[in-house]
Amino acid sequence: MGNRVIVGMGSCGIAAGAKAVYDQLEKADLGAELCMTSCVGMCYAEPIVEVENEAGRIMYGYVDSKFAEVLIQSVKSGSELPAENRIKEDEEGKKYLDRQVKIALKNCGVIDPESIDEYIAEGGYEGIKKCISSMKPEEVIEAVKESGLRGRGGAGFTTGVKWSFLAGAKNNPKYLVCNADEGDPGAFMDRAVLEGDPHAVIEGMLTAAYATGASFGYVYCRAEYPLAIKRLEKAIVDAKAKNLLGDNILGSDFSFNLKVKEGAGAFVCGEETALMASIEGRRGMPALRPPFPAEAGINAKPTNINNVETYANVPFIMREGPAAFNKYRYEKSIGTKVFALAGKIKRVGLVEVPMGLTLREVIEEIGGGSSTGRPLKAVQMGGPAGGCIPESLFDTPIDYDAINATGAIMGSGGMVVMDDQTCMVDVARYFLNFTQKESCGKCTFCRIGTKRMLEILTRITEGKGVESDISLLEELAGHVSKTSLCGLGQLAPNPVLTTLKYFRDEYEAHIKDKKCPAGVCKPLITFKINPDKCVGCTACAKACPTKCISGERKEVHVIDQEKCVKCGICRDTCKFDAIDID
Amino acid sequence: MSCADCGNIAKEAREIVAEVGSEPEKVIPLLQEIQNRHGYLSQELVEAVAEEIKLPVSRLYGVATFYSQFRFEPIGKNLIKVCKGTACHVAGAEKVYSIISEKLGIEEGETTDDQLFTLESVACLGCCSLAPVVMINDSIYGKLNPAKMGKILKEYADGK
Ligand SMILES: Cc1cc2nc3c(=O)[nH]c(=O)nc-3n(C[C@H](O)[C@H](O)[C@H](O)COP(=O)(O)O)c2cc1C
Ligand code: SF4
Ligand code: SF4
Ligand code: FES
């Protein structure tokens, strides 16, 4: 085999400059095959290029055009490959990778996601072949039950049990849906799986179809993920060409067809009944259950819905057997979970860890802790339905029950890390603003209650809060969650309740002292130039969008408070740390 | 509007329906196709498509107004989507938004008078590792700060 040069082309990699690097390599007449893969999860080091020769694969990170040139020269000349930027071998890379166990992400960043042959070479479609050739549908369901796999979309329902409901349904045809709506802002696990290993999702759905008797499937993917949609569509065409999808799969009497449906921007469509309404071409309003989807779903026919990551785990389970999966376990949580690390964390990216690791191990050891050098304050898990877990509880293990006990939820896997410059009242207001906008409007408390809660939170962040606001928030939170039909409304108060539980002092500082301790809420802060530190470099005055900073060169500058819009640009610009927030 | 326009609109509606399909479950893809072609949902075309697939116009508008993807006004030459997802929010999306809004003199949902820019926000582009993130047309820009954002805007204003 000749040498290969492989560029990481997930949409995050491309945004970080991988496309430019790819073009540069393409023009360079490398004398090696130029290939691509998707996101390997080490987003902090993107753009990433791998060089493969007889000795193996070496992964390089931080590849700018200069370093790409160095790589080009050494590949071309066959000389020693550079020793720097080897991100898998350096200290950081080891810490990042050593504790990870990759099942759902096994192929991500390894194979070319647009090549079905590379997927097959890694054992792809072996699981479904085994099912078709030697297992009865009931046996497949038993195997999935035995594996202990639970839904990765948020609620954590046991997957094998869910499949048995559909298998038991009498009506035909039966539908399967893959929920790729990934609505939680700050989460990108499903995008990475779809972009990086679309065939694993297809094989997972095929397995479910075989087990349940479903003949038609949809992948409902959010429109913000054009690359995921493109790769998935190509994967479907390629699988059909190999008779792995479509009629009489691999010569058997099992048939399954699959289509991609593009979402249209509504968070609530991640909810099962709303999602099905959307697939039918209607407004995505949740409906009362029962009937459950397994009885009457799409077109009133039996339907099963699973998340992307849930399906992506299935090929491994079928190929390697349930025991290979359930050997990773902590209490009632089994297998691995993918998390998207973002926010004020050093190594941002995508990680897959066995259940039972603690949040601290994920955030501090794998993620490298704070990116700002400032102390970490909390991690937000579960998006708008979840909550903020304070640093003091970072020793909580990754386990559905243990995380629920904190007031947050495991959720789909978003972890947004916050430092002491993040205002927790602002975070609560941010999420309420989100849920309030995304409420479908069907339930009164979800529609109006969240709006009232948002108004109260806004008032507090503006310094207009009164002492009774906290109890009012708590009271409203109870009503909203009790009287809402779907998870959106039921869980909407979570971000408020968890921040109230763990960061009540911040609320009180806003209300009583009219101060924002984190220095975020604009009406409560002023920007001031510290005369002892200002050297008069004029950088801030040039950067200020409202031109409200005055001062001669080499003299102390002053801010005109009347005109200051508190954008904070001056503070980010000043190299002498001379601008304080008061 | 002249009758030639009506004829053209009816023809385009037929084209769209032939391409996408006419079943009620195709309402969202049909609207998406109209918007792909024109950048927004023009009333004439939505009406013509409704007629073509024999559904009340209200059904199409009912759907269109539910989903945030759909717009009812034409957009400028460049569509800017500022991510306001959690990771971007924490990383300072508001500052990036302010600088754009300030420089272009428009708020979310508006288009500049010279029709060069339309400003929108989205809830997450899935590139949280590069927060704060902005998408302009099909390109994603990450690790932004107000200064960097200003430069990028200028490139587009200069006719990138
Ligand atoms: C408002 C709301 C939004 C949701 N968004 C998503 C989503 O984006 N992706 C997802 O997989 N599940 C989402 N869910 C959960 C799904 O309704 C459902 O539980 C899940 O897709 C089931 O798959 P699983 O059993 O494999 O987890 C959402 C639920 C609610 C109430
Ligand atoms: S809880 Fe909210 S989003 Fe859910 S059905 Fe009721 S109004 Fe709609
Ligand atoms: S905060 Fe913004 S507006 Fe105020 S002085 Fe600094 S740069 Fe100018
Ligand atoms: S929060 Fe901005 S890209 Fe995810």
Image (cartoon, rainbow, N blue to C red):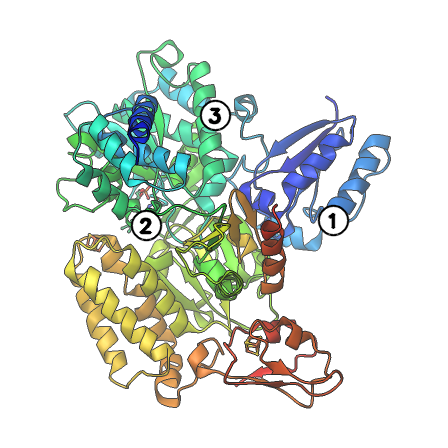
Q: Amino acid at mark 2?
A: Phe
Q: Write down the quadrant of residue A149 in the picture.
A: top left
Q: Which residue is mark 3?
A: A234
Chain under numbered label 1:
A
Q: Quadrant of the N terminus of chain A?
A: top right
Task: Kindly tell me whether mark 2's CB lies below 8 Å from ligand 1.
Answer: yes
Residue A163 x/y as whole percent: 26, 33
Q: Residue at x 69, y 85 (%)?
A: A534
Q: Nearer the viewer, mark 2 or mark 1?
A: 2
Residue nearest the observer in this picture, A201 or A534: A534
Q: Which residue is mark 2?
A: A267
Q: Amino acid at mark 3?
A: Lys
Chain under numbered label 3:
A
The first of marks 2 and 1 along the sequence is 1
Q: Which residue is mark 1?
A: A85
Q: Residues within 10 Å of mark 2 (few under 14, many from 20)?
A: many
Q: Residues within 10 Å of mark 1 (few under 14, many from 20)?
A: some
Task: Kindly tell me whether mark 1's CB lies below 8 Å from ligand 4.
Answer: no
Residue nearest the observer in this picture, B144 or A308: B144
The first of marks 3 and 1 along the sequence is 1
